[in-house]
Amino acid sequence: MPKQTFYNLPEEKRNRIVEVAIEEFSSYSYTKSSINRIVKQSDIAKGSFYQYFEDKLDLYQHVLACIAEEKMAYMQAYTKELTSGDFFDYLKATYSSGIAFAMENPLFAKIGLHLMKEDESTQELIMGDLQAKGEHYLKNMIVNAQQQGSIRDSIDPEFLAFVINKLNFASIEYLKKDQFGASFYSNYESFSQAIIDLIKNGIKKVDNEG
């Protein structure tokens, strides 16, 4: 979390630092990104950087938090028009809005791709409580769906949110390429539909198949 001295800066200067950081983290992985490049492009002294942030991780997590907040607002605006009340309609809309958000914000998408290429321990270090926040969002959707009657009451909402979140990360790991492009998003949209089908219908073969 940035220090108070960062928030004491003029808004224009704060925005400049964040914009430069986004450029850096979209061009390089967290491991290979450079504070020296960031301070140079931001036109601040390196000593000043450490008055604003504890270290590179602190800045990186701040950038991720800003992206997550913007993405959440985008997704909520995307789904608020839904009236069916069906959990799976909302889940599909969540995936679709996430894809749309990434396509409209390619630098954010590149940061996500770099993050997925980090080793597991680095991902866990970086993600902090963002993963927990994502699962909390899903859990609220699941609880609401149980109240609406579209998901069995016997299912633990926390466990299901954990499983769906892990499937989301696994799908990106499965599909990831050197860069995001139209083919990636097309594949991810069909893959997300497969996730929804798996969650909704399970893996048991029904009598009218094959």
Image (cartoon, rainbow, N blue to C red):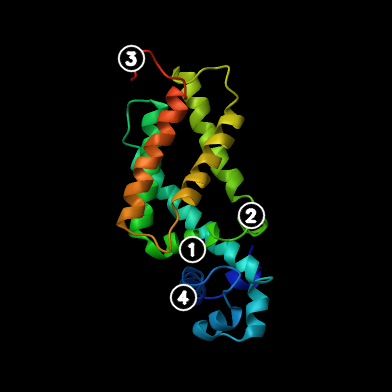
- Answer whether labels 2 and 3 touch (C-beta < 8 Å): no
Q: In the image shown, does 188 or 204 lie closer to the viewer?
A: 204
Nearer to us of marks 2 and 1 is 2
Residue under the image location 67 percent in, 56 percent down: 121
On the image, the x and y values in percent for residue 65 come to 54, 57
Q: Tell me the kind of residue under disc 2.
A: Glu
How many numbered marks have been drawn onto this rendered protein structure? 4
Amino acid of disc 1: Ile
Would you say 110 lies left or right of 135 here? left
Q: Secondary structure at mark 3?
A: loop
Instruction: Evaluate whether residue 30 shows in this view.
Output: yes
Quarter of the image where the N terminus is located: bottom right
Of mark 3 and mark 1, the one earlier in the sequence is 1
Nearer-N-terminus badge (2/3): 2
Question: Are dots 2 and 1 in contact, CB under 8 Å?
Answer: no
Alpha-carbon span between mark 4 and mark 2: 35 Å
Q: Is residue 135 left or right of residue 105?
A: right
* Residue 125 coordinates in the image, percent (x, y): 67, 57
Cα separation between marks 2 and 1: 16 Å
Helix, strand or loop under label 4: helix
Residue labelled with disc 3: 208
Which of discs 3 and 4 lies nearer the camera? The answer is 3
Q: Nearer the viewer, mark 3 or mark 1?
A: 3
* Pointer 4 local density, CA inside 10 Å: few below 14, some 14–19, many at least 20: few
